[in-house]
Every structure is written in structure tokens, then in C-alpha cells.
Amino acid sequence: MFLLIVIVHFMFIFTDKPFANPEASDKSTSVADPDGPHCQLCDNCVAAEAYCKVCKEFMCSACSNAHRRSRGTRHHQLLDKESMPSDIPGNDYEPSHEILSEYCEEHPHELIKYFCPQHQSLHCGDCVVLSQHKCKMEVISKVSFGFKDSGMYKDVKFNISQLADDVCEHTIELEKQTKILDDKEQNDKTQVLDFQSKVIARLNEKFQSLTAQIAQSSQESKVSLSLLQQKAKENEVEATGLKTELVNNESNDVLLFISTYKSQK
């Protein structure tokens, strides 16, 4: 409904005369379906479960639920399956104030009912009463009658459809770029983890090598010390023997002389 009011607003940019379809009052259509009405929004094969008196459209259960939740249509009057008409009402349906469901920005509790062609603005009853401008107001429920079949509405609808397609393509492109960034992030993380693994492996390898070198050097040093200890013991035994021999030969100068010179070699 909000879109309809906005379109009426733009219509007066191009003309200062109220729009009306000259054939609307003479043309009446009533389509009866032996299987009952079908949803006019999503799929003609889906049986209708509700009917909007504002939009004059049959809706399935999913579409009617969305219609009730939408900000622009949640105030619309929906008829359930038991109360809704059995076929599509004709175009000679007389609009009334009940199809207006958008509230005034200046008077939030009042419905928008009037359009000012001079100022290209939408107004409620309070706006008209309190306004200091003496403008000729048009009743929206009358000037908008038949507007759905106008060329301007079809052009605007087509442009909006094109815009929606462009937005969809842009969204798809953004999703692609997001996917590229996600893949790059994952690839970078993989490279970092791989580098980390290589560094850790290299450090472990170096650690093992250094540990082995330290162990080998320590073992070699221990072997050297062991040999020196053995040699020291041998020297100790030899020195002890010479000392004993010298002491034993003190009573014999000849033997003492010989033993002394032997000990110096």
C-alpha cells in the first residue's frame, strides 16, 4: 500500500490532474475457478487461504503470513478461507477509507488520506484542518483508483524490477568477493601453519643434533678422563714401587745408587 501511495505521489510530478482509468468504471471482470481461487502472489497452482481486501488479491498461507508481518501491509484487512470471496472481484470495486493504512509522519495516529498536487505531498485529516495553506486536496482513495493498470505504474514497477535485479547481481558479486576473501584467509592460515610446522620440525631437528653432539662430547671427555685416571693409578703404583725399592736399598750403597738412577729415567 505504501508503494501505491508513493507512486501516486510521483504521478503528480508529471501531471496536475488526478489519474483515473477511463475504462475502469466500464470494465468488470470476475474470474471463477471451479477448484477455488489460487494464490496470486507466488504460484497460481497453490490454493488460496486468505484474501486481502486492500490489495484485492488471493494469497496462500505463506504469502498471507508475510503480508501480516510486513510493515507496509500489516494493517491490511485479511479474510480467512471461510470468509473470502469465491472468485476475483471485478475492477468496479469502489475504494473506501479502509484501504488506507499508512500513517502520517506529523500526526502518527492519523491515516494518510489526501494528496496535495501543488506541493506534491501526502497528508492526513489533521494536516488538512491545521494547514495554513489553502491548497486543493485530492482524496487518495479516489485519484488512485485504477492506477495499477496505468503505464506509469508499469514503468515504475519495471524499473524497480530492474533495480532489484541489479541489486541481486551486486549481492552475488559481493558474495563472490566474500568467498574469495574467505579462501584467501584460509590459504594464508594454511601457509602460516605449514611454515610453523616446518620451523618446529627444523628446531626439533637442530635440538636433536645438538643434544647428540653434547652427549658424544661428554662421552669422549669421560673416556679421556677414565684413561687419565687409569694412567694416574699406574703411575701411582710405579712410584710406590720405586719408593719401596729405594727404602729397601738404603743399606747397600751400590744397589741404592743403581735404583736411584733408574728412578730418574
Image (cartoon, grey):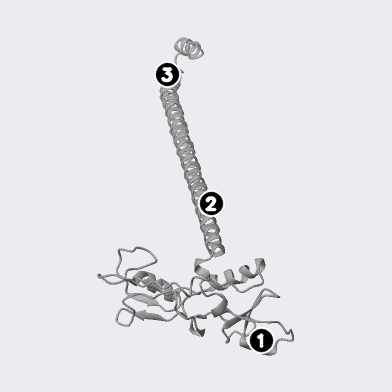
Q: Name the foreground residue: 264 vs 62.
A: 62
Q: Which mark is residue 128?
A: 1
Secondary element at tag 3: helix
Q: Which mark is residue 170?
A: 2
The residue that mark 3 highlights is 245
**Looking at numbered disc 2 in the image, what kind of residue is underneath it?**
His
* Residue at the (41%, 26%) spot, across then down: 223
**Looking at numbered disc 3 in the image, what kind of residue is underneath it?**
Glu
Q: Give me the C-alpha separation between circle 2 and circle 1.
A: 43 Å
Q: Height in image: 231 above or below 209?
A: above
Q: Residue furthest front?
A: 26
**Of pointers 2 and 1, the one earlier in the residue sequence:** 1
**Circle 2 Cα neighbour tier, 10 Å, few/some/many (<14 / 14–19 / ≥20):** few
Marks 2, 3: nearer the viewer: 2
Secondary element at tag 2: helix
Q: Are marks 2 and 3 in contact (CB under 8 Å)?
A: no
Q: Are marks 2 and 1 in contact (CB under 8 Å)?
A: no
* Residue at the (37%, 76%) spot, across then down: 51
Residue 144, given in percent of the width and then of the height, sits at 55, 74
**Looking at numbered disc 1 in the image, what kind of residue is underneath it?**
Val
| Image quadrant where residue 222 sits | top left
Residue 190, given in percent of the width and then of the height, sits at 46, 41
Q: Give me the C-alpha separation between circle 2 and circle 3.
A: 111 Å
Q: Name the foreground residue: 58 vs 190.
A: 58
* Residue at the (74%, 86%) spot, across then down: 132
* Residue at the (42%, 23%) spot, across then down: 227
Left or right for 7, reference 260:
right
Marks 1, 3: nearer the viewer: 1
**Of pointers 2 and 3, the one earlier in the residue sequence:** 2
Residue 104, given in percent of the width and then of the height, sits at 60, 81
